[in-house]
Amino acid sequence: MTLARWKAWVGMLLLFTLGFLSGTVASYWYFHRDYMMRPDRFLSVMGEQMIAYLELTEEQKAVLEEAIRQAQDEFRAMIERAKPEAEEIVRRAQDKLVPLLTTEQLKRLDEFRREGERIRRKMEEEEARRQSR
């Protein structure tokens, strides 16, 4: 194989990897937004189902509700701890692609990164507003 073909294959592989990682991150953010950033929704639904299914007493309901509140706090802490590692993984994958990109593609990648940061900030602001209510 010639050097040009190797570069093409490596470029395609990195592009596929970047696409895969972008999809994974997008899925993570979607899940994070709907469930993990709102564990109250997920855990509340689970709690309501348990209360109905198990026919809990008022005392048992109170214990379950406290357990759910504690779990919500633990979920939020876990998410905060995982964020930097997830961001670093994506950054390293993107950095491998950079040497293969044209000047125009580098500009687009920069725009892509800025848009991702804008969306992340917006989601954090929405979560902060939800928590302050």
Image (tube, helix red, strand yellow):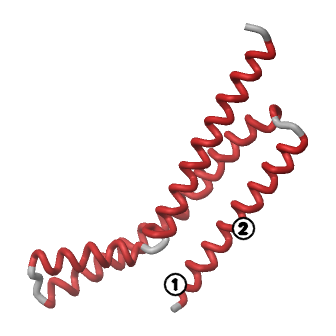
Q: Is residue 51 above or below residue 21?
A: below
Locate residue 80: give its quadrant.
Answer: bottom right
Q: Secondary structure at mark 2?
A: helix
- Residue contact between numbered discs 2 and 1, judged by CB atoms under 8 Å: no
* Residue drawn at (31%, 78%) of the image: 44
Mark 2: amino acid: Arg
Label 1: few (<14), some or many (≥20) within 10 Å? few
Residue 122 lies, in percent from the top left, at 66, 74
Label 2: few (<14), some or many (≥20) within 10 Å? few
- Pair 2/1: label in front: 2
Q: Is residue 120 above or below residue 59?
A: above
Mark 1: amino acid: Gln
Q: Is residue 119 left or right of residue 127?
A: right
Q: CA distance from mark 2 to mark 1?
A: 20 Å
Choose between 103 and 45: the one closer to the eye: 103
* Residue drawn at (75%, 40%) of the image: 95
Q: Residue furthest top?
A: 1
Q: Is residue 7 above or below residue 118?
A: above
Q: Residue furthest right?
A: 103
Choose between 4 and 78: the one closer to the eye: 4
Locate residue 15: give its quadrant.
Answer: top right
N-term-proximal mark, 2 vs 1: 2
Q: Is residue 102 left or right of residue 95?
A: right
Q: Which residue is mark 1?
A: 131
* Residue drawn at (75%, 55%) of the image: 113
Locate residue 52: give its quadrant.
Answer: bottom left
Residue 38 lies, in percent from the top left, at 45, 74
Q: Secondary structure at mark 1?
A: helix
Q: Which residue is mark 2?
A: 118
Residue 114 lies, in percent from the top left, at 77, 60
Residue 3 lies, in percent from the top left, at 80, 13
Q: Quadrant of the N terminus?
A: top right
